[in-house]
Amino acid sequence: MTMTKTVISAATAAVLALTALHANARDRYDRSFHFVNNSNAVVYSIHATDVGTSSWGADLLGDDVVQPGQSTVVVPRQNRGYCRYDVRIVFDRGPSQTIPNVNLCELRELATNGNGPRYGRLPYTLTFI
């Protein structure tokens, strides 16, 4: 009976260890981030593509928009092991803001202040882990 319990306990421990390793590997490439619209314009779309890619791809907001003062969680759809992305934010009045070479694997929050310096602030701020 003791031998059976030992074998079962060892097998259970191995399964738990593999599950934990798999969870850590998955979380290491979590590219989702909190987006805050600190501008005075509605954000109509957000795109994120691998650095150096010529196409922006799908709108990550889908049918949603982000009103001034609101926030949302953005989840890029590309999961090929890349962490560095160019991010494009499109505002309701037509202009867009491009933020190059952002490490989305380490980014926790991206806050836009609009398409240019406003009230002495930078056009955007990035908060990393």
Image (spheres, rainbow, N blue to C red):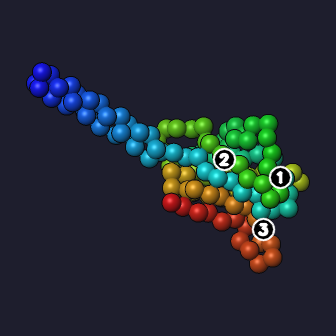
**Which residue bears the numbered disc 3?**
116
Kindly state the secondary structure of the residue where label 3 is placed. loop
Which residue is at a point 44% across and 47% down the rendered structure image?
28
Residue 97 seen by the camera: no
> Which quadrant does the N terminus fall into?
top left
First reached walking from the N terminus: tag 1 or tag 2: 1
Front position in the image: 77 or 24: 24
Residue 60 shows up from this direction: yes
x%, y% of residue 70?
A: 78, 54
Of mark 2 and mark 3, the one earlier in the sequence is 2
Q: Quadrant of residue 3?
A: top left
Question: In the picture provided, is 66 more to the left or to the right than 55?
Answer: right
**Real-space Cα distance between discs 2 and 3?**
23 Å
Front residue (pair 99, 110): 110
Q: Residues within 10 Å of mark 1 (few under 14, many from 20)?
A: some
Residue at image mark 1: 67
Seen at 73% across and 41% down, the residue is: 61
- Mark 2 lies on residue: 73
